[in-house]
Amino acid sequence: MFVDEVRINITAGRGGDGSCSFRREKFVPRGGPDGGDGGHGGHVVFEASPRMTTLLDLRYQKHYEAEVGRQGGAANCSGRTGEDVVVALPVGTVIFDDETGEVLADLVTAGQRFVAAHGGRGGRGNNHFATSTNRTPTEFETGTEGEGRSLRLELKLLADVGLVGLPNAGKSTLIAAISAARPKIADYPFTTLTPNLGIVRWGEKGSFAVADIPGIIEGAHEGKGLGLRFLRHIERTSFLLYMIDVSEWAPEEPVKSFEIMRRELAAYDEPITTRPFAVVATKLDVAGDKARLRDLQKYCKRHHYTCLPISAATREGLTELVTYVGQQVAQLRATLCETIS
């Protein structure tokens, strides 16, 4: 089961109390204070793991609590620090404070860590409170409480290319044809109910990741169909492919399909519509007299959009599509590297 959003509670460990103790040895009748410090409480830590692809495990365990610090001992012995709780999350998980909505961390690289709740500080033992006028202090500190939080975790797939289309536009068929991903494919709307991720190889050593999300319908921003819930999975993509069905039995005219998707994306997040994109005319093998394809190509030419006709079933146009997209992704990556440097 694919789970991309959960709410959990976390509690860091409480710090251990300091100790009140005095040195007791033979021939030392008035030994000074030797109470040790309490150990610090354990933290709650999140770590991005490439082995995880869903937040399913966290749906069943809603609370994580780190170990408390131990109390200090005699002879200036400090208490043991509590063990941290390390929670593995899929790469691409965003951590929100559930009460304020603040983004606390965005785990975008494998191995990246975030301390979400800090353990309490251990209290000081009475050996810290001796003065020239008070040689036998009985004062010591208690440990402080660890932090507690309610969090919302949201997974966003990390991909270079996002596939956007109406239901049954051929997105899943395409990702299955150009990558090793094996999404469910059938000739009816909303076959895809969860996002799919595929790695596409091109050229000698090039590759890029493609994200396929459930189809968008008109009125999705108002909650129709599957709504826009899964659009978060293309928020990180740098390039979009608008998949347009040009078959003779397509439910919508190609140009209208494109305009519907642009409106729905704009209603969800206007900046997404400013990203580089290309239009992919799908199901070329069943396009009939290709009148729909010609209408779409004229529209794209008029607006200076790149239009790539393909048939995933017969593999017509797939080599050209993969090469074009690979070149665009490589160029975008190079531009990003120049900007960072």
Image (cartoon, rainbow, N blue to C red):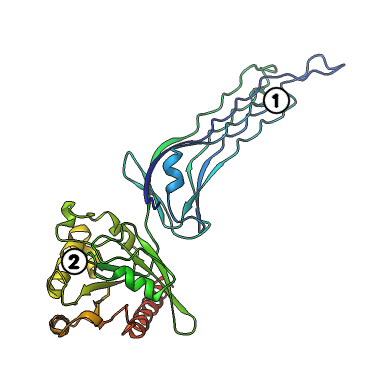
Q: Secondary structure at mark 2?
A: helix
Residue that label 2 marks: 261
Q: Is residue 238 visible?
A: no
Q: Residues within 10 Å of mark 2 (few under 14, many from 20)?
A: many
Q: CA distance from mark 1 to mark 2?
A: 67 Å
Residue that label 1 marks: 73
Q: Residue placed farthest to the top in the image?
A: 29
Depth order, front residue of 46/31:
46
Sequence-earlier tag: 1 or 2? 1
Type of amino acid under label 1: Gly
Left-right relation of 307 to 5: left
Q: Secondary structure at mark 1?
A: loop
Q: Is residue 70 visible?
A: yes
Instruction: Name the residue at 53% across, 40% down.
Output: 43
Type of amino acid under label 2: Met
Left-right relation of 237 to 289: right
Depth order, front residue of 48/289:
289
Depth order, front residue of 184/235:
184
Instruction: Name the residue at 16% across, 73% down.
Output: 249
Q: Could you tell me residue 240's position as x and y percent? A: 29, 71
Left-right relation of 112 to 220: right
1 vs 2, front mark: 2
Using the rendered view, name the quadrant where residue 84 is placed.
top right
Using the rendered view, name the quadrant where residue 279 is placed.
bottom left
